[in-house]
Image (cartoon, grey):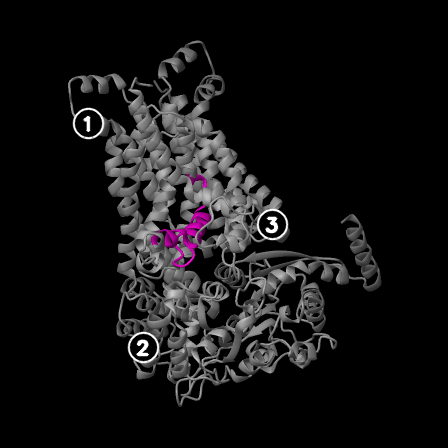
């Protein structure tokens, strides 16, 4: 179908986007790589020359490194599992006939519109505060001792806050996918007396697989970079320091740009490992 | 409104014609503390006097620090005045990043600034930032609860007495904790508090060769004491409580004692915000039996001008206005003496009206008891009481205090936290080339 | 779509869905309610739900303290500008990927997505230095560009999936009739892709509105959007729940209202090619 002329036209049309993104990727990447090999301490007179692989060695050998990688993965995985599972259930529920469907849908997607900073502040102060928080009141109402959420259940709390923000996104995409499901097929299965679980496993789930991969892919990209939620709630204490938070500490709190840049390179590597892994799955799923 | 604007314009115009100076708009980065917010409300007074307009960038402390540090180290030039503290000032001044404040006008009376504050905001004897308000730390306690417990707070209590008093006032049935203290991670939060507590037990961050000292028995004693005290008589979740959290607990009458910044005194005695305003007493920060250093820090939020700004003259005018005696009088006239920015000027403490303010004397005594050049029992190679004035400190101390907070929350033992703190401090000092 | 079910089942569905919907929405509702309380009522124990003296005091304090209109305007300009600019760049790219695919099309698409994985904190200093050189610090133009670049991969991908769903036969028929490339894009493709473009715009607008790292670190006064506005209310001294709630409500209200009005569009359009 494509002629030679339309091919070159296509290339021309693609060029601005590709060039811009190439620039946006390469300029910071090259600068990060450059700084990662230098001793660059802004508060001690700036750039102080080459240091070889020192920054790389120091960043990995720090006792904070592996726990940070682990925390990152736990948060990403935790949020993914929660949002995808609840998202599927919610999407199925919202697809059922009911009164006031439109309003319910609005209620469910609302958290997606809330800035991460605001949602972290609201959860931290008005819900999770062990003295004045609403959850503390609820616990006391049932005669239990309030939980110090952000210290005793810090990681779970952050996973919960982030899941609250991303559940609407997953639900939306899954809902759109479910609505495109051929209802005759479902009804036929129902007539045949297939039990609910079987219908779910053999008809609904396969139909949703593409939507689920897309939810996972897009959310992973955003979740690897979550920052505001941690900065506002725990400041990286109580085992909630992710890799990007560790880099923040090195660059801004310790004012060691070289060391932080080396961390940035590791974060890119980690992101790419996750990406390759994901794209294998997604790529396959996107083809058919 | 329009009348006021017209008036302002007229004043500005007359000033311009009088002095030949141009009206400029200066950008000020500041922290969202109550005194700063109040100052923003009086900006009109400054504009009327000088013709210069002011743009405020008000940020929460952590964001502010991140923002101004990035800007000053890269010479971004986004701000004409930055609000910084006693930790940043000498370091930035030494780097030549701040405009020296050595030519302030005679009316400003720079010698009136409290010597402790002036010393802490100078490098090599040159003042680089003017204190807007200064603070030390002291004990704030509930006089009614102390009376009920049959105890009498001495002016200079020991930690042992504090523990006794906390035990006597602790009343879980009525939702009253014996004592509230900071436990929140962050060098300026729980990190500052545990550092001065360490000082008052004879501990120090480094010895004279920059060896980290967390493996010493003094630190263990300090941390053990703090953890036991708070576990026994502290509020639920104290490991995440910082200044603000404790302030609101105390104002709600949920603490028998609170050891924290002297500026809090005006908040806890303000009947509009505090349910216990009538019943607050003050005492010097405690020390351990037989240790000469007390747990009181020294801090100032100060205004500094980044080198390279185009509007240096206007910025200086603003600093002279905001940290002047006249500004203090302006606030006193409008909102009462208890609400003026404290801890910056000697003359304030000589004002008879201010001497009637219940916390004035104890604030001054606390400030005078703090000496940043001699903070610990054993000699140290650094300046600073609740901090170590080296560029690496903020990052290192935040990590150390995160380990401590994890110990407060019971997620690790005191020994484990101290071992990790030792490793972190050693690692940082090696990376920075001190050893 | 609407299947026939028994009224009883419909009642159960309705009850369950409303309960869950309200639960999910509750934090936002609570924030809005708290913004109308006094500070003392905001921390009252037991908590007050509706039986309190409604007051606008907090909004008054916030309006007096900060120039809300300017923050709001900057948010609108940055989110809107980056969305429009992003579309201008992305539509041709997505078009060519969808209709003139080559072997490398999918690689390019996935590579574009991978550029989003560079951790922002790691490159703060490089970008800050670059912005100083270019004189873009605290300028709306600078932020529009950054927001556009950050979200470009998502825009291209979304548009690509919409374009792919347009049947090729229509295009071929148009070409037979002698339509030029320009006419093809303008008169055939674009109208057919309007729903897709609309939901892409919405999503991008939301993402740009909520971005809080670059918008906070690259601005001071002139270009500071609502994310910077909220940073001055996070933890002042003393009681602050009510004021924080008022500021939060003001920061999220515009986007919440926009989202509600356009939710049908969003529900229909947010497929990322997941629906076949």
Spot occupied by residue B279 in the image (x, y as percentages of width and height)? 53, 72
Q: Does residue A235 appear to the left or right of B374 in the view shown?
A: left
- Is A64 located above or below residue B299 in the figure? above
Query: Which label number is shown at residue A82?
Result: none
Characterize the local packing of mark 1: few (<14), some (14-19) or many (20 or more) Cα atoms within 10 angstroms: few
Q: Nearer the viewer, residue A80 or C100?
A: A80
- Number of numbered discs on residues: 3
- Residue located 29% across and 20% down the image: C6
In this rendering, which labeled residue sits more in front, label 1 or label 3?
A: 3
Specify the principal SS of the magenta part: helix
Q: Nearer the viewer, residue C50 or C166?
A: C50
Spot occupied by residue B51 in the image (x, y as percentages of width and height)? 76, 59
- Residue located 79% across and 58% down the image: B12
Q: Is residue A114 magenta?
A: yes
Q: Disc 3: which chain?
A: C
Disc 1 secondary structure class: helix
Spot occupied by residue B305 in the image (x, y as percentages of width and height)? 62, 66
Q: Would you name the residue on which mark 1 appears? A: A196
Disc 2 secondary structure class: helix
Please give the range of residues in magenta.
A111-139
Q: Quadrant of the C terminus of chain A?
A: top left
- Is B233 located above or below residue C166 in the figure? below
Q: Nearer the viewer, residue B410 or A243?
A: B410
- Residue located 44% across and 89% down the image: B292
Q: Does residue C207 appear to the left or right of B435 in the view shown?
A: right
Q: Would you name the residue on which mark 2 appears? A: B224
Q: Does residue A285 appear to the left or right of B160 in the view shown?
A: left
Q: Would you name the residue on which mark 3 appears? A: C57
Spot occupied by residue A135 in the image (x, y as percentages of width and height)? 37, 52
Instruction: Say whether residue C105 is visible.
Output: no
Q: Disc 1: which chain?
A: A
Query: What is the residue that sits farthest to the bottom in this orientation?
Result: B290
């Amino acid at each position: 179908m494509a002629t030679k002329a339309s091919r070159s036209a296509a290339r021309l049309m693609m060029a601005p986007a590709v060039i811009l993104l190439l620039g946006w990727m390469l300029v910071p990447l090259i600068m990060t790589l450059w700084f990662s090999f230098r001793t660059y301490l802004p508060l001690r007179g700036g750039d102080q020359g080459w240091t070889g692989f020192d920054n790389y060695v120091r960043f990995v050998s720090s006792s904070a490194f592996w726990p940070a990688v682990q925390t990152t993965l736990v948060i990403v995985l935790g949020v993914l599992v929660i949002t995808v599972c609840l998202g599927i259930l919610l999407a199925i529920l919202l697809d059922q006939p009911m009164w006031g469907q439109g309003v319910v849908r609005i209620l469910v997607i609302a958290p997606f519109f809330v800035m991460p900073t605001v949602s972290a502040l609201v959860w931290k102060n008005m819900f999770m505060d062990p003295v004045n928080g609403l959850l503390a009141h609820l616990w006391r109402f049932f005669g239990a001792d309030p939980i110090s959420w952000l210290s005793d259940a810090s990681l779970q709390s952050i996973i919960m806050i982030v899941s609250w923000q991303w559940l609407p996104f997953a639900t939306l995409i899954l809902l759109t996918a479910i609505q495109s499901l051929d209802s005759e097929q479902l009804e036929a299965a129902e007539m045949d007396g297939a039990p609910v679980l079987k219908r779910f496993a053999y008809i609904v789930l396969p139909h949703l697989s593409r939507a689920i991969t897309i939810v996972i892919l897009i959310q992973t990209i955003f979740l690897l970079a979550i920052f505001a939620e941690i900065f506002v709630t725990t400041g990286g204490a109580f085992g909630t320091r992710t890799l990007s938070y560790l880099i923040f500490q090195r660059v801004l709190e310790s004012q060691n740009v070289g060391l932080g840049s080396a961390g940035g390179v590791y974060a890119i590597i980690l992101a790419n490992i996750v990406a390759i892994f994901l794209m294998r799955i997604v790529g396959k799923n996107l083809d058919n | 409104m329009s009348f006021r604007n017209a008036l302002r314009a007229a004043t500005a115009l007359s000033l311009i014609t009088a002095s030949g100076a141009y009206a400029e708009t200066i950008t000020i980065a500041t922290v969202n503390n109550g005194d700063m917010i109040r100052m923003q409300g009086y900006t009109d007074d400054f504009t009327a006097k000088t013709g210069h307009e002011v743009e405020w960038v008000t940020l929460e402390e952590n964001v502010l620090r991140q923002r101004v540090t990035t800007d000053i180290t890269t010479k971004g030039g986004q701000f004409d005045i930055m609000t910084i503290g006693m930790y940043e000032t000498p370091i930035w001044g030494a780097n030549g990043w701040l405009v020296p404040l050595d030519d302030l006008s005679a009316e400003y009376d720079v010698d009136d600034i409290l010597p402790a504050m002036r010393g802490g905001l100078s490098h090599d004897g040159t003042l680089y930032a003017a204190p807007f308000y200064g603070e030390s730390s002291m004990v704030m306690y509930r006089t009614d609860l102390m009376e009920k417990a049959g105890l009498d707070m001495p002016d200079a209590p020991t930690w042992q007495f504090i523990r006794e008093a906390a035990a006597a006032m602790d009343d879980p049935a009525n939702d009253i904790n014996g004592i509230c203290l900071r436990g929140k991670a962050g060098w300026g939060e729980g990190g500052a508090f545990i550092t001065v507590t360490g000082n008052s037990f004879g501990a120090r961050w480094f010895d004279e060769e920059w060896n980290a000292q967390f493996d010493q028995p003094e630190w263990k004693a300090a941390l053990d004491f703090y953890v036991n005290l708070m576990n026994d008589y502290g509020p639920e979740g104290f490991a995440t409580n910082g200044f603000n959290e404790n302030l609101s607990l105390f104002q709600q009458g949920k603490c028998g004692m609170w050891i924290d910044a002297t500026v809090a005194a005006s908040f806890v005695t303000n009947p509009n915000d505090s349910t216990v305003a009538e019943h607050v007493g003050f005492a010097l920060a405690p020390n351990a039996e037989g240790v000469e250093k007390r747990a009181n820090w020294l801090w100032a939020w100060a205004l500094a001008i980044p080198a390279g700004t185009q509007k240096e003259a206007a910025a200086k005018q603003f600093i002279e206005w905001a940290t002047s005696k006249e500004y203090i009088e302006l606030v006193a006239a409008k909102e009462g003496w208890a609400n003026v920015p404290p801890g910056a000027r000697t003359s304030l403490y000589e004002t008879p009206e201010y001497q009637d303010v219940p916390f004035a004397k104890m604030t001054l005594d606390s400030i005078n008891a703090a000496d940043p050049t001699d903070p610990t029992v054993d000699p140290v190679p650094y300046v600073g009481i609740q901090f170590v004035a080296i560029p690496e400190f903020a990052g290192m101390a935040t990590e150390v205090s995160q380990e401590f907070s994890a110990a407060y929350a019971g997620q690790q033992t005191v020994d484990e936290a101290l071992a990790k703190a030792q490793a972190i401090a050693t690692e940082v000092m090696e990376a920075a080339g001190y050893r | 779509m609407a299947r026939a079910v028994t009224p009883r089942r419909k009642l159960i569905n309705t009850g369950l869905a409303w309960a869950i919907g309200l639960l999910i929405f509750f934090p936002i509702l609570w924030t809005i309610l708290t913004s109308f309380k006094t500070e003392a009522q905001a921390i009252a124990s037991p908590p007050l739900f509706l039986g309190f003296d409604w007051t606008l005091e907090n909004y008054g304090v916030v309006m007096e303290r900060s120039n809300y209109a300017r923050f709001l305007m900057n948010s609108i300009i940055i989110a809107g500008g980056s969305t429009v600019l992003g579309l201008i760049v992305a539509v041709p790219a997505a078009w060519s990927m969808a209709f003139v695919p080559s072997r490398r099309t999918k690689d390019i698409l996935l590579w574009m997505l991978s550029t989003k994985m560079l951790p922002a904190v790691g490159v703060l200093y490089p970008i800050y230095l670059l912005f100083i050189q270019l004189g873009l610090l605290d300028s709306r133009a600078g932020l529009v560009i950054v927001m556009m670049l950050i979200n470009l991969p998502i825009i291209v991908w979304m548009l690509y999936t919409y374009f792919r769903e347009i049947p090729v036969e229509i295009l071929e028929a148009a070409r037979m009739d002698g339509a030029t490339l320009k006419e093809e894009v303008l008169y055939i493709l674009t109208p057919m892709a309007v729903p897709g473009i609309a939901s892409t715009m919405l999503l991008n607008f939301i993402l740009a509105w909520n971005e809080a790292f670059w918008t906070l670190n690259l601005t001071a006064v002139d270009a500071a959007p609502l994310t910077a506005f909220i940073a001055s209310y996070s933890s002042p001294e003393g009681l602050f729940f009510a004021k924080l709630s008022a500021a939060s409500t003001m920061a999220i209200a515009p986007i919440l209202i926009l989202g509600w009005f356009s939710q049908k569009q969003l529900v229909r359009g947010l497929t990322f090619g997941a629906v076949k």
